[in-house]
Image (cartoon, grey):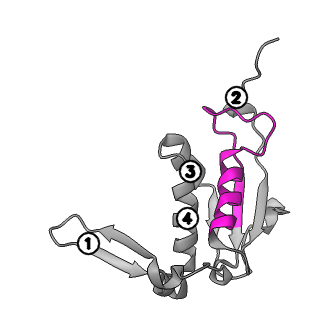
Amino acid sequence: MSTFMAKAETIERKWYVIDAANKPLGKTAVAAANILRGKHRPEFTPHVDCGEFVIIINAEKAVLTGNKLEDKYYHHHSGYIGGLKSIQYKTLMATRPEMAMELAVKGMLPHNKLGAKAATRLKVYAGAAHNHAAQKPIEL
């Protein structure tokens, strides 16, 4: 008996909706990353992109546990000398909650072409409304 290997051409992709309201940011990101990667499927193959589309709604209502709102920072660099910029997560969650969720999910995906391709299938919205009703997403 040989091992089944999925092919990217035969994968049928579904759409899933995850509501992040009153849930920890990290736990929501883990659920999204697993679906984006395709690890929930029985035919999961590590070297094939067999993930699905994920819509995360209510990102502004996601919760950071402990003192993470005060202690955690997002750092990025402009590329110039002295160009390190830091944003506290309290500010980031107040101004751009979609970015905080995207950063958490992208950090849990593989850092290669498969992960980059999976990250394009992630849609994050701060509020409860999204414009993907035509895809008939499944509630998670």
Under mark 1, the amino acid is Leu
Name of the residue lying farthest toward the top: 1
The residues tagged by marks 3 and 2 sit, at their Cα atoms, a distance apart of: 20 Å
Disc 1, SS: strand
According to the picture, the residue beneath numbered tag 4 turns out to be 104
Q: Which mark is residue 72?
A: none
Disc 2, SS: loop
Q: Tell which of 30 and 54 is nearer to you.
A: 30
Q: How many marks?
A: 4
For the point 60% across and 49% down, which residue is it? 118
Magenta span contains residue 31: yes
The label nearer to you, 3 versus 2, is 3
The residues tagged by marks 3 and 1 sit, at their Cα atoms, a distance apart of: 25 Å
Under mark 4, the amino acid is Ala
According to the picture, the residue beneath numbered tag 1 turns out to be 84
Under mark 2, the amino acid is Lys
Disc 4, SS: helix
Magenta span contains residue 97: no
The residues tagged by marks 4 and 2 sit, at their Cα atoms, a distance apart of: 28 Å
Name of the residue lying farthest toward the front: 66
The residues tagged by marks 1 and 4 sit, at their Cα atoms, a distance apart of: 20 Å
Q: Tell which of 70 and 59 is nearer to you.
A: 70
Residue 88 position within the rendered picture, expressed as x and y whole percent measured from the top left: 43, 82
In the rendered view, tell whether residue 18 sits above or below residue 126. above
In the rendered view, tell whether residue 131 sits above or below residue 3. below
Residue 74 position within the rendered picture, expressed as x and y whole percent measured from the top left: 41, 73
Task: Name which of mark 3 and mark 4 comes first in the sequence.
Answer: 4
